[in-house]
Amino acid sequence: MRYAIYGAGALGTVLGAYIARAGVQIDLVNRNRAHVEALRRDGAKIVGTVEFTQKVNALLPEEMTGEYDIILLMTKQQHNAEVVRFLKDHLKADGALCTCQNGLPEPGIAEIVGADRTLGCAIAWGATFHGCGVSELTSEPSALTFSLGAYGRGNRLEETKKLLECMGTVVIEHNFIGARWSKLLINSAFSGLSTVTGGTFGEVAVRKDSRRVAQRIIKECIDVSRALGVTVEPVQGHDIVKLFDYKGAFKKKISFMLIPVAMKKHKNLVASMLQDLKNGKPCEIAFINGAVSEQGKRANVPTPFNDRTVEIVSAIERGEKTFSFGNIALYSDLF
């Protein structure tokens, strides 16, 4: 069997190291030549909540040959069509391209490789890139979970599950779009506001001003998904709709108090979008909060807090603003 991680950056380096440590041969593919050379020379160095160094097989995209049984796609979505067309030539007829990306990427991927070869995976842990060959796992080891689902008939679904189990717990979701919305809800609130403020998920959750905004972003996601007929799946055993949906003042107060508790295992996470902007790269805000805004228009549900998050992050990306907790004041007119 041949396996690859395409886009072995922060998350992919950690996942690839775990898989290789389990004795499974997998290629870690990345466009960053210096990163690939460091992985080849020194192995994948994992720091943070766990620490180990693992020898891995690293490649540049142009060094990929032949066809793979399973490719885990872990790039950002900005160039998905181009990347997926490239990977199609390296995917077996009965193989699977499993997207581990944020947002709702499966429909676009299925258009290129076919529905039966399209799998989706929602990752419930985080990592930070610390330079060539080094990645920090920022979530607690107990939070290393995956939600896996099929877009079509699910080529290689069980095999992909076993591959991911080299690192953590994998739940096959028959309602995978509901699992996607669970991850989108968390990302919209905490990745979005981590990028707006420059803070960690924990800082966003603890500060009352940013927590108020996070609560509203979460509520918009719940309202949009409900209007679309989507049943949002639990996250790590917790029914997030039951926890964070509200109508009256009492439930709203309870949900507000629960946010720091819910983020405790992920308090050190920093949004990959924030890391991208710090490194002068474009970020995928259009595929996270922007996806909520787009789906809200489809469902005729207003999403002012997600819309404003897109506006602020886009302004930061253009160099017109900088990330700061002072940006939370830019939401004040929406309350």
Image (cartoon, grey):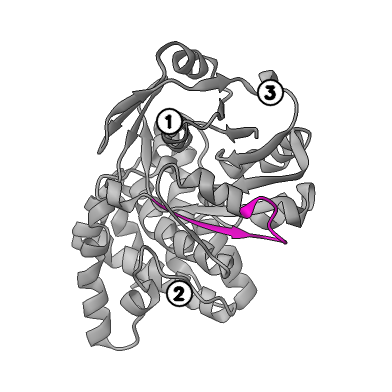
Say whether residue 157 is left or right of residue 123. Answer: right
Rounded to the nearest angstrom, the CA distance separating label 3 from label 1 is: 19 Å
Residue 176 appears at what percent x and percent y? 57, 65
Closer to the eye: label 2 or 1? 1
- Determine the image quadrant of residue 291: bottom right
Residue 240 seen in the current view: yes
What is the magenta range?
A: 145-157
Residue farthest to the bottom?
248
Residue farthest to the top?
41
- CB within 8 Å, label 3 to label 2: no
Rounded to the nearest angstrom, the CA distance separating label 3 from label 2 is: 41 Å
Residue 110 lies, with reference to residue 64, above or below; the image says below
- Determine the image quadrant of residue 261: bottom left
* Numbered tag placed on residue 288 in the rendering: none
40 inside magenta stretch: no
Which residue is at 59% across, 20% downward?
A: 59
Query: Which circle's residue, 3 or 1, is located before the other in the chain?
Result: 1
- Which three-letter amino acid code belongs to the residue tagged 1? Ala
* Numbered tag placed on residue 17 in the rendering: 1
- Which three-letter amino acid code belongs to the residue tagged 2? Ile
Which residue is at 22% across, 56% downward?
A: 264
* Numbered tag placed on residue 222 in the rendering: 2
Pointer 3 residue: 64
